[in-house]
């Protein structure tokens, strides 16, 4: 039996996440305080007290989810509560948590990079009005066909499961694509509450800026396997990690491909660490015979 750890991405945040851990565990308080020091502002206060509008800002929620997730991971590791795992994966932002778990990134480097990532992405959101929508019940080939027929920038952003695919791009183009996808027979369309067009060409500037940041930090070869969103395959070297993390910002998240790769490689148990249960829900839609476990914050 092979076990993989899964780490959530943006959207999993909620006001108060991790507060119980912080109140009960000195190590948790230490890590939150360290993150505050690294960032130069009181991140933990926003996490524990809100307001929700502040926590949901891209440049706040990304480090908030990362830190809270890693607090849970570190506590489990120190107490010997982690399962015997051999691969980690994270959805978009969650890939940074997966790399910290595999010791390719330090806690400090990950916090700094994720804050920069969120800031750069928010800057691109502010430049162009973008949107995202989740499309339920149409195959990706049909979604691609419809998106390619629309004037403007719109395309697939997340392959979350065979039946759940997100599109992203310019606001008007996404709205038009949704209209056409409804006509094409999609079962459900859910507009996503995001700041802009993540994982689309509208994030190209953020990708370029983050690529520069990667040249300033120390990234190591992971001690365990880590699978990348951009490639749907393993990141084996520091250079591959840098490339995959840079490219994922403006390219589709190949989550279905990544999970299917792990299943094909013999993984039978997937453990989600962090806020929410989104990823274990998605893996069940990819293969309902998989065993899932949640370690929530």
Image (cartoon, rainbow, N blue to C red):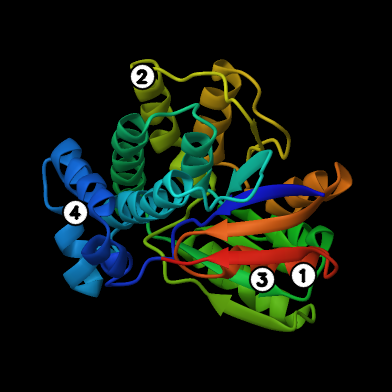
Where does the image place residue 128, in percent across and percent down from the top left? Answer: 37, 53
**Mark 4 vs mark 2, CA separation in Å:** 22 Å
Comes first in the chain, label 4 or label 3: 4
Query: How packed is label 4: few (under 14 Cα within 10 Å), some, or many (20 or more)?
Result: many
* Tag 3 residue: 281
Comes first in the chain, label 1 or label 2: 2
**Mark 1 vs mark 4, CA separation in Å:** 34 Å
Query: How packed is label 1: few (under 14 Cα within 10 Å), some, or many (20 or more)?
Result: some
Where does the image place residue 22, in percent across and percent down from the top left? Answer: 25, 61
**Mark 1 vs mark 2, CA separation in Å:** 37 Å
Left/right of residue 105 with respect to residue 263 in the rendered view: left
Instruction: For the residues labelled 1 and 3, say whether their Cβ atoms are less than 8 Å apart.
Output: yes
Q: Residue furthest front?
A: 79
Please, what secondary structure does the residue beneath circle 4 have? helix
Left/right of residue 137 with respect to residue 219 in the rendered view: right
Where does the image place residue 258, in percent across and percent down from the top left? Answer: 73, 46
**Mark 1 vs mark 3, CA separation in Å:** 7 Å
* Tag 2 residue: 217
At 35% from the left and 35% from the top, the residue drawn is 107
Asked whether 53 or 102 is in front, the reply is 102
Instruction: For the residues labelled 4 and 3, say whether their Cβ atoms are less than 8 Å apart.
Output: no
* Tag 1 residue: 285
Comes first in the chain, label 3 or label 2: 2
Instruction: For the residues labelled 1 and 4, say whether their Cβ atoms are less than 8 Å apart.
Output: no
* Tag 4 residue: 43
């Amino acid at each position: 039996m092979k076990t993989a750890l899964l780490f959530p991405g943006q959207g999993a945040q909620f006001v108060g996440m991790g507060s119980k851990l912080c109140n009960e565990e000195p190590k948790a308080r230490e890590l939150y305080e360290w993150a505050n020091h690294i960032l130069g502002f009181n991140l933990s206060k926003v996490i524990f007290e809100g307001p929700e509008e502040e926590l949901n800002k891209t440049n706040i929620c990304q480090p908030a989810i990362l830190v809270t997730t890693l607090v849970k991971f570190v506590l489990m590791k120190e107490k010997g509560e982690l399962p015997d795992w051999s691969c980690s994966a994270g959805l978009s932002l969650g890939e940074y948590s997966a790399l910290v778990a595999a010791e390719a990134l330090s806690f400090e480097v990950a916090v700094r990079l994720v804050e920069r990532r969120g800031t750069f992405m928010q800057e691109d959101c502010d430049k162009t009005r973008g949107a995202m929508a989740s499309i339920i019940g149409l195959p990706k080939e049909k979604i691609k066909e419809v998106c390619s027929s629309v004037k403007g920038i719109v395309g697939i952003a997340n392959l979350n499961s065979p039946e759940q695919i997100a599109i992203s791009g310019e606001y008007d183009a996404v709205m038009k694509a949704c209209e056409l996808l409804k006509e094409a027979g999609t079962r459900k369309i859910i507009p996503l509450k995001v700041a802009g067009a993540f994982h689309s060409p509208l994030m190209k500037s953020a990708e370029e800026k983050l690529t520069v940041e990667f040249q300033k930090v120390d990234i190591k070869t992971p001690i365990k396997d880590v699978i990348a969103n951009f490639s749907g395959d393993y990141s084996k070297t520091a250079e591959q990690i840098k490339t995959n993390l840079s490219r994922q910002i403006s390219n589709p998240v190949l989550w279905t491909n990544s999970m299917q790769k792990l299943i094909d490689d013999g993984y039978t148990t997937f453990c989600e660490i962090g806020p929410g249960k989104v990823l274990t829900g998605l893996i069940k839609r990819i293969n309902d015979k998989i065993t899932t476990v949640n370690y929530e914050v």
